[in-house]
Image (spheres, rainbow, N blue to C red):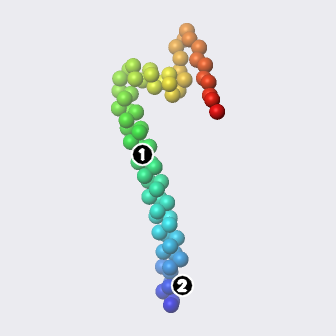
Amino acid sequence: MYTLFLDENDIFTIFYQTRKLNNLEIKKAGVNSNLIETIKTLNQLKYLPEVERYARENKYFKKDDEDVFVIFSE
């Protein structure tokens, strides 16, 4: 009875720690998927034409003699 409710490692603490561990594992999976995408992007950016394409598409960079119009649709 003492170990179930009054001990330092009671049943409520065990449930709380288990739920916390599950949440951390879900976050870890998300971070791992982001890491894989980042590694793929870095591998593509080893070549100059890919760097230019990435900068234009994702960072909206432009050359000196051109205008860039960004259109968002909802």
Picture quarter with the C terminus: top right
Please say if 16 is above or below 33: below
- Per the image, label 1 sits on a secondary structure element best described as helix
Q: Which residue is mark 1?
A: 33
Q: Position of residue 42 (x, y in %)?
A: 38, 33
Choose the circle earlier in sequence order: 2 or 1.
Answer: 2
- Residue closest to the far front: 74
Report crowding for label 2: few under 14, some 14 to 19, many 20 or more residues within 10 A (C-alpha).
few
Amino acid of disc 2: Phe
Horizontal side of 68 relative to 51 (left or right) equals right
Residue sitting at x 53%, y 17%: 62
Q: Position of residue 5 (x, y in %)?
A: 54, 84
Residue sitting at x 50%, y 64%: 20
Residue sitting at x 50%, y 79%: 11
Q: Nearer the viewer, residue 52 or 7?
A: 52
Please say if 36 is above or below 23: above
Horizontal side of 39 relative to 8 (left or right) equals left
- Per the image, label 2 sits on a secondary structure element best described as helix
Please tell me the numbered disc located at residue 18: none
- Residue closest to the far top: 65
Residue 8 appears in the rendering: no
Q: How many marks?
A: 2
Please say if 39 is above or below 26: above
Amino acid of disc 1: Ser
Instruction: Kindly report which numbered mark, 2 or 1, lies closer to the viewer in this rendering.
Output: 1
Q: Position of residue 39 (x, y in %)?
A: 38, 38
Residue 43 position by quadrant: top left
Report crowding for label 1: few under 14, some 14 to 19, many 20 or more residues within 10 A (C-alpha).
few
Alpha-carbon span between mark 2 and mark 1: 40 Å
Q: Which residue is mark 2?
A: 5
Q: Position of residue 34 (x, y in %)?
A: 44, 43
Residue 31 appears in the rendering: yes
